Image (cartoon, rainbow, N blue to C red):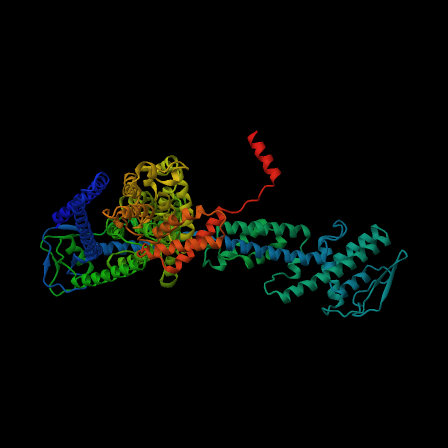
Amino acid sequence: MMKTQQLFQSMTQKLIDWRQKSKSLRRQIYWSSNNGQDEYHTMRALSSMAKSIKTTNRVAVRGKKRQQSPVLFAIAVVSLTGVLGQKLYNQPQLQVGAVAPQTIKAPTTANIENKRKTEEQRKAVSKSFVPVLMVDARVNEQIQQNLQQLINQGNEIRSAAGAYPFYDTFILSVSTQRYLRSCSQWEWQALLLAINKTKQPKPGRLPKKQPTTTVKNNSESVNYVTTQENPENLKPDDLLNNAEFTQAVNELEAYRLSTSEQNLSSLLNQITQVRKTYALARTKLLEFQATQSNTIYDKTSLLDLSDDDWGKTQTGIQLISELILTQGIPPGLPQSILTEAVNLHVQNIVPKEAEVLASKILLSVLKPNLKRDELRTQLLSAKAASVVKPVIVTVRAGQVIVRKGEKITAWHFEVLEHYHLIRREINWLGLTQLVGAIIGAVGIFTVTERKIQYRFRQKDRLLILLLTLSVPLSLAMGTPYATSSAVGLLLGNFYGTRLGITVIGLLSILMPVSLEISKVAVLASAAGGILASFMAQRLHSREELALLSVAIALTEGGVYLILRFALSAAFGFFPYYTVLYNAGFLTLSSLVWCIVALGLSPYLEKLFDLVTPIRLAEMANPNRPLLKRLATETPGTFQHTIFVATLAEAAAKQLGCNVELVRAGALYHDIGKMHDPMSFIENQMGGPNKHDTEIQDPWKSAEIIKKHVSEGLVMARKHSLPSSIQAFIPEHQGTMQIAYFYHQAQQMAQEDPTLEVDEADFRYSGPIPQSRETGIVMLADSCEAALRSLKDATPEQALVMLKNILRARWQDNQLAESGLTREELTQIAEIFVQVWQQFHHKRIAYPPKAKASSEKSSNG
């Protein structure tokens, strides 16, 4: 078959060359004489035969390509089954829980590790390991806030009572001042009577109620009221036996003797004011006790402390709390131990009068502030478990491993596996199910492929298959399981979002079915692959792809952490150390694989003839060798190319086509004109037309014009342009007629009836546009010259002219295979007119004098 095809191709090429030579010979005969009629008919017959053979060959090749699709489908199913079904080819027949078909003995003596017992011992060590505790900063902060709140509350109550001691302690002792502030009104009245020399109450005759009395001392009077009831039902003998009362009377009497009556009166008035503020403070304290359940203050513990002792108490409480919290309070600590520790600190730091109060404040706010340090606990626990030596069991030669009829345990299975006594077989049921799943997956991919607006070649399908196989192959070889993110990055960049997501989704379903792999890791890797597929083709620089790689890696690690923590909350505890380690490893491996994918991308693009947005942007760089030559050697063609690219790009953007491909293809569509620049009118710069002055042969001129297509393809292949860009070179002309020279030939035929004009000689060889992108460039190329010729035309006139041109292309069946619709032609014409208006907008007309002045200035 191959030899026959090669023979047909050889014959076709020879006959095509013969046809070209015959046409040249025919024209020479015609111009020299009229005796070449027989030769002309012979050449026409051979030419028709060559066309027929060439058409047959094309049909055979297309038929062969159609037959290759089922073969590739079968190859995909077989290769995926071979890689994904590894464990199904060699499954043990004797499994844990199965009944032994016969008694099996050990053939030789061996030392075998009992993995189950080893694992049990290691788990026991891990469970018995004392957890590592760490200080919970959040609890410490809460304790400090509560403590400060209590201290502020005490300060507020004490501020209402005023300063204490309120008088010179050399005159009134601290204990006397405390008594004078806090004693009852009845005691205060009795004290006033006691220090009054004129009306000093006799023992045993102190009344419970006294009328209002005025005591005059050195013309100063002290008013006091004795009408209040005795709140404590004190008897005069009880009061006179009260040491505090007696001490207060003695100190006041001593002061009376050492000073004037006026000073004594002033002191008594000050004591009266202090008693009032003290009463207000007690009222506020009672309000706190009534409204706040957590208050621990009472009048004796708070108001009876001096200001100095209270300041020392505050400082001591803060210091003790910091010491205890720094040491840490573990959960479950008995309250008696905490109380003992607090009392021990209080005795050494706080004033004696405030010890009880300080202990109550601290014990009311202190609570366990240590929590389990999961990471360090697991790390040390794993380290302790790793020290446990494996449990080694010696199995003697001839010793019975398992008896007939017994159930095979995990230990039996380990021993049988060690001696290679496990019977292995192919799991045909599982293999059949896997094949069915793979056929379904490949079928889904095929349906998706047909819905994508991309002409897949066999090499494209082969590349997709190889990239798909790389994921399970890398897992089988023990490499990191983040390969799917790299595959998604490449597939999304090469073939778009839909195909990349389809492949990643199908792989994520198939791999857990047949391979031993963490489902959480598969989902995390799939999330990264989907992100890569979605974003890859939207980026237009290597730098953006590098940033996308970082985002993919972080996405995989983040999804893994979220899923693991969610499963931990739902089904039980996972070791945090292991989770964090696996998440970090997954993130790092994903980043490494993405870097590998970015490095392989240019080589795959070259090897499989692919175009990506980045590669197209690089191809459209005006510093590329071919474009630099085009601008230098054919400046007119280059300007024509720029305008065509502008028109086509605007239309492609509006119609949702591949704008990058259209831009690059339009820039290269006329590179073949560099083989003979002066044969094309845009490069003649108003000079003589060589077709009219030198050639004067429409057939030869048509061949020169058509040659810019074949020469363009030669240049494109020489400079390794992608085939998708090469397609613009022949398809932008399609099979259009070279009308100018065709009409010239018809005029010659009218003058000489013996001269036959074949329209095929004046048509391009094609093919007609096979994609929307090449069809748009054809239309832009057809309209460019017409738009340039317009000077003072209105947009409406320009639109009518362009519609006529596009209608002619449609009627000539040039767009039959492009995918463009008749309705879109009108839209394209309107876009072309809009671009033309932007390029040829009207300018402000200069006044004659200003214009003359401008010309004079420029000439001068």
Left or right position of 278 against 387:
right
Look at the image and tell me whether residue 576 can be seen.
no
Which residue is pictured at 12% across the width and 52% down the height? 396
Left or right position of 328 against 393:
right
Look at the image and tell me whether residue 160 can be seen.
yes
From the top left corner, tell me how far across and down residue 611 is, in percent: 33, 47
Extreme residue in the right direction: 219
From the top left corner, tell me how far across and down residue 168 is, in percent: 76, 50
Quarter of image, res 826:
bottom left
Q: Nearer the viewer, residue 486 or 793?
A: 793
From the top left corner, tell me how far across and down residue 613 is, in percent: 37, 47
Q: Is residue 588 above or below residue 573?
A: above
From the top left corner, tell me how far across and down residue 442 is, in percent: 25, 59
Q: Is residue 157 above or below residue 31?
A: below
Q: In this view, does 597 lie above or below 289?
A: above
Q: Is residue 3 above or below residue 271?
A: above
Left or right position of 12 against 376:
left
Which residue is pictured at 71% across the width and 58% down the height? 160
